[in-house]
Image (cartoon, rainbow, N blue to C red):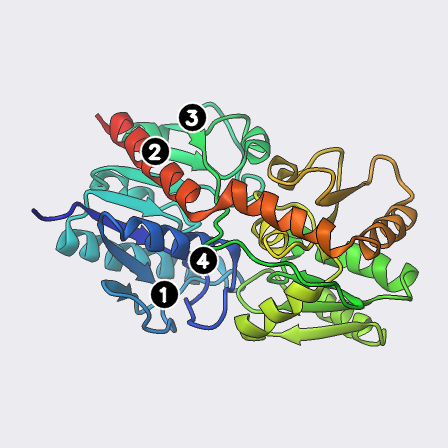
Amino acid sequence: MNKEKILIIDNVFAPSLKDRILNGVQKFSKAQREVLSDDYEVHYITMKGSDSQFPNQHTLSVIQSVTIDKKEKLKITKQLAKEISDIIDEVKPDYVLDNSCKHFTTLYDKYKVGIVFEHYHKSSAPLNPDTKLKFSKNKIYWCGVSDWQNKQFRNYFNGTTSVQYMDSEQTAIPSKDYGIFIGRWDRGKTPHIIMQEFSKHVTDVKLHIFTTIDYGFVNDTDMEIIEQLKKNPNIIFHIDAPREETMEYLKGAIFVLGGGKESTGIVSSEGAGYGVPYIVRGNKKVAEQEHMNEFSMTLLDISKKEIPKQLKEAIQKYKNYTIKDRQKVATEAYLRYNRNIFKQKQLELLEKAKQYAV
């Protein structure tokens, strides 16, 4: 009996590489491909410049960019849509899981059963009562990635799902003398704010920053900030580092430092999977609190001010965590986000979308 077919469209703003994850959407897309391949024939669309990695991988001849002018963006968008349309015609998927981060509305009527995942922490365009029409008229299931994010979108989503995935339980190791930041440099998430606070007020701990400055909103001001931060001997930048190196540093970190304004918080849970707690600034509530408790994370609440004091207290707290404490963080994270649970949520989502498409 032939398996049903699933087509996953990866993020259109970055290539998919074997040894690096350039954004959280890619990690989620690869996790979907991994678990759904158990039961479906999965096809996977990646962008120009991607490495060949998977069976049924389709690599497009173009890639979108956020740094070019509007006219050129529109031209690339049309080319992306055409090539994806051709793949849909060839593959004839039963389901399309759209993680493109680009609303290809002209393609929606070609999705037999479609799920469009919204990965931004807020809408890039004004929301109004007609916003959902482009999805509902084509019976596309519009899915958010956290309840916190759904509120930023006025609760317009058809539903939300968890994007956290851990394929095995890790054994925590004792922390070393540093914290870590992992993430694409994205001005919209304001990573520079917490890094500058760290640079000014924390002198007894190093911070390793693993980032890429490509494929995002990086301007001259950002580059000036990065160069200024590099002058601090306690701040070490790792630009475009291999994932293996990133994970080795992550395991031994005292804490993960978050940039803020995340729609879900994949890095926070990835750190927790190794027993590493999380520190992030935000206003009263952040998306990461949906899967991190007070023992495994600290919110530097900007509504309470005194961020430097909160930051130093959080770092000291996690410096005092024993190996038993760190293992508790790792075990709790795995119990909540192991492979079986992630797969079950994806299967349930397929069923919801199927019913919505009727």
Q: Residue at coordinates 83% horizontally, 57% vertically from top-left? A: 319
- CA gap, disc 3 and disc 2: 27 Å
- CA gap, disc 4 and disc 3: 29 Å
- CA gap, disc 1 and disc 4: 11 Å
Q: Residue furthest left?
A: 1
In the rendering, at what x and y percent does residue 267 appear? 60, 54
Amino acid type for the residue under numbered disc 4: Gln
- CA gap, disc 2 and disc 1: 28 Å
Amino acid type for the residue under numbered disc 2: Glu
Which residue is labeled 3 in the image? 130
Please give left or right for residue 81 compared with residue 124 in the image. Answer: left
Q: Residue furthest front?
A: 324
Please give left or right for residue 15 compared with residue 170 in the image. Answer: left
Which comes sooner in the sequence, label 4 or label 3? 4
Q: Which residue is at the front of the view, 78 or 261?
A: 261
Secondary structure under badge 1?
Answer: loop
- CA gap, disc 2 and disc 4: 21 Å
Judge whether residue 212 can be spotted in this image. no
Amino acid type for the residue under numbered disc 3: Asp
Which residue is labeled 1 in the image? 47
